Each structure stands twice: as C-alpha cells, then as structure tokens.
C-alpha cells in the first residue's frame, strides 16, 4: 500500500516538471529519462546494472567494476547516471558495455525500463534512494544493493521528513554496504533492516588504491603545462574561483611561474567562469581550445573538458577541493591524495567528513576559510617543498590503508550475482 501511494505521488509530482525538462539542461537525453533504453543496453544479457549519480560517483564505482571484470568477466555491465556529464564519463573511462541516463522514477517509466533491461542485480552507488527503481527491482525479484552507502547528517534530516516512504522502500533493498558506522546507524534509523547493513568503507578510498599516475595521461598533460607550478582548483562552485584568483594574486608576484587550473564542478558553468576570468583581466586559456602547450603568459587554465581532472592531478603541486568554502558539503577530498598531492579544503566538509578528518589527522591536508588562508597555505607549501612531499606521502598512506574496500564490497555483491 505504501508503494502504491509513493508511486502516485511520484507520478503526479513529475507532471509539472516535464515542460521544464524540455527547456533546460535536464532535458538533454529526454528520451532516456522518459524510459527509452538505448539499443546497446537492450542487447545485454541480464547485465549488472550500476547506478551512479554523476561524475564523482561514476569514478568511485571504478574499483568495484574492476572487481566485477576480474572475477566475473562474463557478466555485462550497464551504468546509469543522473547527469549527462556522468554518462559521458562512464562511457569514456569505465570498462562497461553500455551507459545511459537513469529513467525518471515514476512507476510506469522505470518499470518499462526494467522490463527492457532485465538486470540480474542493481547496485546503487552512495545511497540515492529511488523508490520507483527499488520497487521495480523488488517486483521482479532482482536483488538491489546500496554500495559505498553514505547518509550525511543533512541528508538524514531530509529523509526523516518522508520516513513513511523510506520505511516502505528500504526493506526492499537486499543489502547495504555503508561507508562508516555512522552511515550504517542513520540508514537503520530510516528503515533499513539492521541485519542487512554492513560497513565496508568508501569506494573512493579503493579508487585511490587502484588508480595512480599510471592510470592517467600524466605525461601528455605535462607536455601541455611544461615546467609550470600547477595549483589546481577541483570541483569548484560559485565564489570559489574568485577565492582562488584572490589567493593567487598574492602569490604571483613572488612565484610568476604558477599556473592555476580551474575545474568547475558543473559543465554548464564553464562560460560563467570564463567570463569571470575575462573580467578579472588575467591571461587565460581553455583546455578545449589548446592545440599545443600552455602559453608562458597564461596564468589560468580553465579545464572545460569532461573527465580530465584526474589527468591533471599527477602534475599538480597542490590541490584545493571545492564545495567546501561554498557551503555545499564537499567533494572527493581523497582523489588528490591518491597522487601524493597536498590537499586543501574549506570548512564545509559534512558530506566527506570521514575522509576529510582522516587526511587532517594524518597531516595530509589543510583547512582554510578564505583567500588569505589559501594563499598562506599554498605559499608555505611553495616555500617548503619537503613539507609538500611529506603531506603527499601521508595522504597516500591514508588511501592505501583503506585499499581493501573494493574487495569487501565485491564479496558482499558476489552473493547476489547468480
């Protein structure tokens, strides 16, 4: 009964937004969002369906997909995403058989897609609770697992407002592989059966162990940036690009060889950030327009290409992780540590609290609050290369210590593959 009510609510709730979908960025791939399954996905024989919301979740899924390929190479893998950028990243970076946008969650749409895909199991990355998707899997007795599950304090508060729905939906999930004890406790409070909840860790740690300079195009990128001192702003949000420009304005007089690389979190902000740089009067270039090395006079490189940030990290001197000064909650603070780079982030890390705390405790990261703090942190690292090397080494140790996450997660998933 709760499912029927939920389905009606979801269906009615979608109707007013369909015209908006046609007119905004969310309308890209509208056919897939309305349940059209691409031919490549329809042709798969009972695939493992992995859902990863956007670029960060897609990249975090990589070590689990590597485990699937290593241990069950005969199984086809389909990845769905919520964003177009995520879908394109899945197609370009992951060894999967097909990628598509997640169909909208109203029952008629998602169940039609489920019939056409016929998955053997569904793996949802990082706890996106999609009632329609979970219900459609349960109706067909398809195991549905949440892997690398994360429920922040803020998300838990939002879900508590619809606890009647989570308590109806979560018992239909076969197993929960959560990142931490706190995440496990929160998901149980929302209605997950305690005996199905396991703590396996964050797959972002596992990606760190599986990745590294050999997994990137580092040498080719080094040919683009030459011997410049590269400072990276990763996954930035409005206000954070200006903060980094202000910080570098204090550093450029002493270190004119600094190249600031800005990687906005959302592709639709590329033009906005380019206008910001133009208005600031700094020499800038766009990665999409580079046909050779960055010019000597260029001070800022705008990374307006999808999925290329990991290629820049091996040549970075230090990295600021965005969504942490702007109160978003933080993005993947571990990824720079994978490559032995000192990490800097702001005060708002609630969504990545465990990882941020681990880096801070290990001496691998610095927390800043404003442009002056950032300038001071980067300036100290530039003055003390041995400190930068030590912080980078500590970060890699943090990642390596949690490298068994992919194996633990796969061990849980494996029981549901047949």
Image (cartoon, helix red, strand yellow):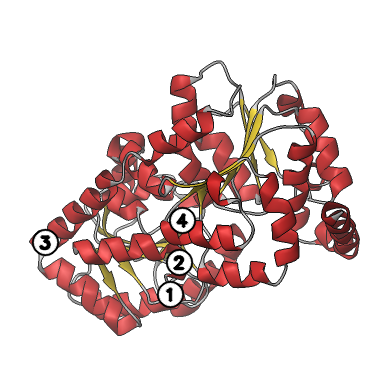
Counting from the top left corner in percent of width and height, residue 200 is at 42, 45
Disc 2: which residue: 330
- Cα–Cα span, label 4 and label 3: 26 Å
Give residue 303's mark: 4
Which residue ends up furthest to the top in the rendered image? 74
Mark 4 or mark 2, earlier in chain: 4
Disc 1: which residue: 348
> Of discs 3 and 2, which sits in the foreground?
2
Which residue occupies 58% across, 53% down?
A: 127
- Cα–Cα span, label 4 and label 2: 19 Å
Counting from the top left corner in percent of width and height, residue 87 is at 62, 43
Give the quarter of the figure containing the N terminus. bottom right
Disc 3: which residue: 385
- Cα–Cα span, label 4 and label 1: 24 Å
241 vs 73: above or below? below
Counting from the top left corner in percent of width and height, residue 189 is at 58, 63
- Cα–Cα span, label 1 and label 3: 27 Å
- Cα–Cα span, label 3 and label 2: 27 Å
**Residue 48 figure quarter:** top right
Which residue ends up furthest to the front in the rendered image? 195
Instruction: Tell me the crowding category of disc 2: few under 14, some 14 to 19, or many 20 or more residues within 10 angstroms, Cα based.
Output: many
Query: Which sits in the foreground, 44 or 376?
Result: 44
Query: Which sits in the foreground, 162 or 96?
Result: 162
Counting from the top left corner in percent of width and height, residue 241 is at 44, 72
> Of discs 1 and 3, which sits in the foreground?
1
Do residues under tags 2 and 1 come within 8 Å of each other at their CB atoms? yes
Which residue occupies 65% across, 70% down?
A: 160
**Residue 46 figure quarter:** top right
């Amino acid at each position: 009964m709760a499912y029927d009510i939920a389905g009606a609510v979801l269906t009615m709730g979608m109707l007013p937004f369909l015209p908006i979908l046609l007119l905004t960025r969310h309308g890209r791939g509208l056919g897939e969002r309305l349940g059209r399954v691409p031919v490549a996905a329809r042709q798969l024989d009972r695939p493992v369906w992995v859902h990863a919301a956007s670029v960060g979740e897609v990249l975090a899924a990589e070590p689990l997909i590597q485990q699937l390929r290593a241990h069950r190479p005969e199984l086809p893998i389909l990845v769905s995403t919520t964003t177009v950028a995520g879908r394109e990243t899945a197609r370009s970076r992951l060894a999967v058989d097909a990628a598509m946008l997640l169909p909208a969650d109203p029952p008629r749409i998602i169940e039609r897609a489920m019939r056409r895909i016929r998955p053997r199991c569904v793996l949802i990355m990082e706890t996106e609770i999609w009632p329609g998707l979970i219900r459609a899997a349960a109706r067909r007795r398809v195991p549905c697992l949440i892997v690398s599950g994360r429920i922040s304090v803020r998300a838990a508060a939002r879900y508590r407002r619809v606890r009647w729905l989570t308590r109806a939906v979560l018992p239909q999930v076969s197993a929960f592989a959560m990142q931490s004890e706190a995440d496990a406790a929160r998901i149980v409070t929302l209605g997950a059966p305690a005996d199905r909840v396991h703590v396996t860790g964050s797959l972002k740690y596992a990606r760190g162990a599986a990745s590294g300079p050999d997994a990137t195009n580092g040498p080719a990128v080094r040919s683009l940036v030459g011997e410049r001192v590269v400072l990276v702003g990763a996954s930035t949000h409005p206000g954070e690009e200006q903060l980094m420009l202000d910080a570098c304005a204090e550093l450029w007089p002493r270190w004119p060889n600094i190249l600031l690389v800005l990687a906005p979190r959302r592709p639709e902000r590329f033009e906005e950030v380019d206008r910001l740089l133009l208005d600031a009067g700094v020499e800038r270039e766009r990665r999409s327009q580079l046909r050779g090395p960055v010019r000597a006079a260029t001070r800022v490189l705008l990374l307006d290409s999808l999925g290329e940030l990991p290629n820049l990290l091996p040549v970075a001197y230090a990295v600021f992780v965005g969504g942490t000064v702007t109160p978003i909650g933080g993005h993947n603070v571990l990824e720079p540590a994978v490559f032995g780079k000192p990490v800097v982030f702001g005060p708002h890390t609630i969504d990545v609290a465990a990882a941020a705390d681990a880096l801070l405790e290990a001496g691998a990261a610095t927390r800043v609050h404003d442009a002056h703090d950032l300038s001071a942190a980067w300036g100290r690292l530039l003055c003390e290369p041995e400190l930068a090397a030590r912080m980078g080494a500590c970060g890699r140790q943090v990642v390596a210590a949690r490298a068994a996450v992919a194996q633990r997660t796969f061990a849980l998933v494996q029981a549901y593959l047949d």
